[in-house]
Image: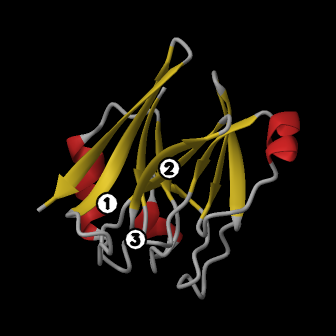
Amino acid sequence: MKILLVSDTHGNNEVLDKLVKKHPDMDLYLHLGDSEATPEQLRPFITVRGNCDYFSDADDKFMIRTEVGYLFAAHKPPFVDPIVAEKSNITIICHGHTHKRRFEKIGKILYINPGAISFARDGNDLSYLILEIENSKVKHTFINIR
């Protein structure tokens, strides 16, 4: 499974079309909120509502089944009780909001933030992330936008 993850585009919708054209072989395109875009502008991305998505009717969170367990997506980094996560088979948590890249395993949970398409706040370039889940292995690649 190949997933393209973006967050915090803040109205920079042209980049979404460019990313889909650049990476047409993805199984899934996920936007982790603060798009400030309409559903039509976001297609084919599945999205969660961010704190700046005032008029969005997207859900605040969702889960997707993967071969390594569930991927939980929300805009703000959620606190997830490790016991609840294990009982729910949540192994990956993806979020945006901080505008900072993150790929960190805490206990049995992998936390991922692809960085930001607009206004990076961690000293890195603007970025997105390609997540590959295959043969029970999880690989990632941060890709800079220049």
In which quadrant will I find the C terminus? Answer: bottom left
Residue 112 shows which numbered tag? 2
43 to 123, vertically: above or below: above
- Residue at the limit of the structure toward the left, as seen here: 146
User: Measured from the top left, where is residue 81 in percent x and y?
Assistant: 82, 52
Element at label 2: strand
Quadrant assignment, res 86: top right
- Residue at the limit of the structure toward the top, as seen here: 135
Residue type at mark 3? His
User: Measured from the top left, where is residue 99 in percent x and y?
Assistant: 40, 70
Residue type at mark 1? Leu
Q: Distance from label 2 to label 1 (Cα)?
A: 19 Å
User: Measured from the top left, where is residue 38 in percent x and y?
Assistant: 49, 75
- Residue at the limit of the structure toward the front, as seen here: 107
Q: Which residue is mark 3?
A: 99
Q: Which residue lies at the image location 50% right of the left edge and 45% below the top edge?
A: 104
Q: Distance from label 3 to label 2 (Cα)?
A: 12 Å
Q: Which residue lies at the image location 27% right of the left edge and 58% below the top edge?
A: 127
Task: Give the left or right position of residue 141, taking residue 97 as reference.
Answer: left
Residue type at mark 2? Ile
- Lower sequence index among marks 2 and 1: 1
Residue 16 shows which numbered tag? 1
Element at label 3: loop
User: Closest to the observer: 42 or 141?
Assistant: 141
Quadrant assignment, res 68: top right
110 to 18, vertically: above or below: above
Q: Distance from label 1 to label 3 (Cα)?
A: 17 Å
Q: Which residue lies at the image location 57% right of the left edge and 75% below the top edge?
A: 50
- Lower sequence index among marks 3 and 2: 3
